[in-house]
């Protein structure tokens, strides 16, 4: 009877370790997928921010060039 009890206890221990490992693997997979999605979203947001900054910089350069041109015209008309 003692051997049967110990065998059942050992079997229960193996089953619990195995089921915990499966749960851990599922959680690791879910965490990896969530992390991948977060990184992809952050990369997209960064790319959008870079594009917007480049457009704003281009607009600022164009405005500065136009204002400089106008200032030069005004300065040369007065002489």
Image (cartoon, rainbow, N blue to C red):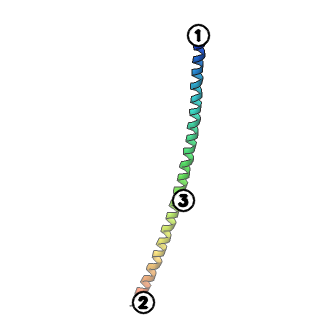
Name the residue that disc number 1 marks: 3
Q: N-terminal of the two: label 3 or label 1?
A: 1
At 48% from the left and 75% from the top, the residue drawn is: 63
Q: CA distance from mark 1 to mark 2?
A: 110 Å
Instruction: Please state the horizontal and vertical placement of residue 74, each as a whole percent of the image.
Output: 43, 86
Instruction: Please state the horizontal and vertical placement of residue 57, each as a whole percent of the image.
Output: 48, 67
- Which residue is most to the left? 79
Name the residue that disc number 2 marks: 77
At 55% from the left and 50% from the top, the residue drawn is: 40
Residue 66 vs 76, above or below: the answer is above
Name the residue that disc number 3 marks: 48
Q: Quadrant of residue 35?
A: top right
Q: Are marks 1 and 2 in contact (CB under 8 Å)?
A: no
| Badge 2 element | helix
Instruction: Please state the horizontal and vertical placement of residue 36, each as a whole percent of the image.
Output: 55, 45
Q: Quadrant of residue 72?
A: bottom left
Q: In the image, which is nearer the foreground, mark 3 or mark 2?
A: 3
At 46% from the left and 72% from the top, the residue drawn is: 61
For mark 3, does the 10 Å Cα neighbourhood hold few (<14), some (14 to 19), or many (20 or more) residues? few
Q: Which mark is residue 47?
A: none
For mark 1, does the 10 Å Cα neighbourhood hold few (<14), some (14 to 19), or many (20 or more) residues? few
Q: Are marks 3 and 1 in contact (CB under 8 Å)?
A: no
Asked whether 51 or 17 is in front, the reply is 17
For mark 2, does the 10 Å Cα neighbourhood hold few (<14), some (14 to 19), or many (20 or more) residues? few
Q: N-terminal of the two: label 1 or label 2?
A: 1
Q: In the image, which is nearer the foreground, mark 1 or mark 2?
A: 1
Q: CA distance from mark 3 to mark 2?
A: 44 Å
Instruction: Please state the horizontal and vertical placement of residue 44, each as a whole percent of the image.
Output: 55, 54
| Badge 1 element | helix
Q: Are marks 3 and 2 in contact (CB under 8 Å)?
A: no
Q: In the image, which is nearer the foreground, mark 3 or mark 1?
A: 1
Q: Quadrant of residue 4?
A: top right
């Amino acid at each position: 009877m003692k051997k049967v009890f110990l065998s059942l206890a050992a079997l229960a221990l193996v089953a619990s370790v195995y089921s915990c490992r499966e749960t851990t693997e599922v959680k690791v997979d879910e965490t990896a997928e969530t992390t991948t999605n977060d990184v992809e979203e952050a990369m997209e947001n960064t790319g959008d921010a870079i594009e917007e900054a480049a457009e704003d910089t281009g607009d600022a350069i164009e405005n500065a060039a136009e204002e400089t041109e106008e200032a030069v015209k005004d300065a040369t008309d007065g002489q």
